[in-house]
Image (spheres, helix red, strand yellow):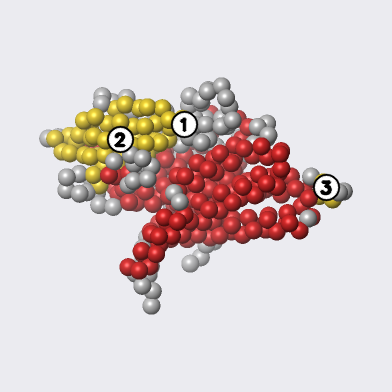
Amino acid sequence: MDFTFSEEQQAAAEAAAGVFADVVPDSVPSPADTTGAVAEDFDRALWARLAEADLLSLLLDEEYGGAGLDAIALCLLLRESAKVLARVPLLESSAAAAAVQAFGSKELRSGLLARAARGELVLTVAAHGRTGHDPAELAVTARRDGDRWLLDGVQTAVPWAFNADLVVVPAHTDADRSVLALVAPDRDGVVLAEQLSTTGERLAELRLESVPIAVVDVIDADGAWEWLRDLLTAGTCALALGLGTAVLRMTAEYTGKREQFGFPVATFQAVAVQAADRYIDLRAMEATLWQAAWRIASGAPGALPAAADLAVAKIWAAEGVRRVVQTAQHLHGGFGADTDYPLHRYHAWAKHLELSLGPAAAHEEALGDLLAAHPLG
């Protein structure tokens, strides 16, 4: 396949770099803050600038004010956002809106998508299940009750739930099908309990107690949740790539200026070898990400299902971003732990992404199962 980006995709990445150019990672909440203070909201000013630049609607069709682009364009945008630790629900809202467009009814699309494209409606996704280790669609039950659905269950670690207008909740039915329900956080029967991530950001445990949802607000289409889950996974890998890229650049700049014995430490073989290894990690993260994003965007069949490409991307993203930040901390010495320097924030975000992606060993096992079920040649 050809990994050359189209003119439209490159333009989206350049526009994103321009919007994020003024974002300072020092403004991101610090996990080292001992005051117990948490950010009450995401960066609304940045969100407005993204909307003005038409970057909240990349995946939406022109009729909703979008650009009609694909998962690759979204991943390029997310890569740029992670370089500066942008505090916006860019992945969740963009992916959820794309799922509504792909699988939602005409009535649902007309009511939501134009507002989401303008940044007026913020969406998020409950994707981590009851504990963070079990399938998200099994954590909530959905049962039909006349002209509505009733939802019961718990989802953990829901990002931006306290600030989003709607939470997309996967749920399973008595017929062993997965549906997507759009739930307003202030609806009767919805309870949000505060949780904190390793980044210091506020998450939510979402409890649903016989929450009534209108039929129009439930997407009951084959493959909808799996498609959304895959897009979220690719986007998370893109965030890991962007973060790792920024951290390696910080490390190169620091080791190029820091001197020992009259020479920059970057000229020492031990330092150069470690930095080179991390560069290789980033290139592998990049190649596997674009392979997975291309598979999602094109829907092209292969010898293995798209889950195989995503498993490989997750392995490299989870392991790679961890190694990049650990090496950065090591090569920065004590300076890397200085809370006045942004590296500790990147380290905390990297750990959050690693945990969100799940352990590489589990993905390797899943990949092995796929290979066993789909032997190559």
- Assess disc 3: are there few (<14), some (14-19) or many (≥20) residues with their C-alpha within 10 Å of its C-alpha: few
Quadrant location of residue 104? top left
Q: Amino acid at mark 3?
A: Gln
**Secondary element at tag 2:** strand
The residue that disc 3 covers is 260
- What whole-number distance in Å separates the C-alpha atoms at marks 3 and 1? 40 Å
- Assess disc 2: are there few (<14), some (14-19) or many (≥20) residues with their C-alpha within 10 Å of its C-alpha: many
Q: In this image, 114 relative to 284: left or right? A: left
Name, please, the residue furthest toward the bottom: 377
State yes or no: discs 3 and 1 in contact (Cβ < 8 Å): no
Decide which of 308, 97 is in the foreground and name it: 308
The x and y percentages for residue 110 are: 30, 38
The x and y percentages for residue 274 are: 68, 56
Q: Amino acid at mark 1?
A: Leu
Q: Earlier in the sequence, mark 3 or mark 2?
A: 2
Marking on residue 154 = 2
The x and y percentages for residue 206 are: 34, 32
- The quadrant of the picture occupied by the C terminus is bottom left
The residue that disc 1 covers is 196
State yes or no: discs 3 and 2 in contact (Cβ < 8 Å): no
Residue 369 appears anywhere in the view: yes
- What whole-number distance in Å separates the C-alpha atoms at marks 2 and 1? 17 Å
Above or below, 98 against 297 in this view is above
Decide which of 359, 104 is in the foreground and name it: 359
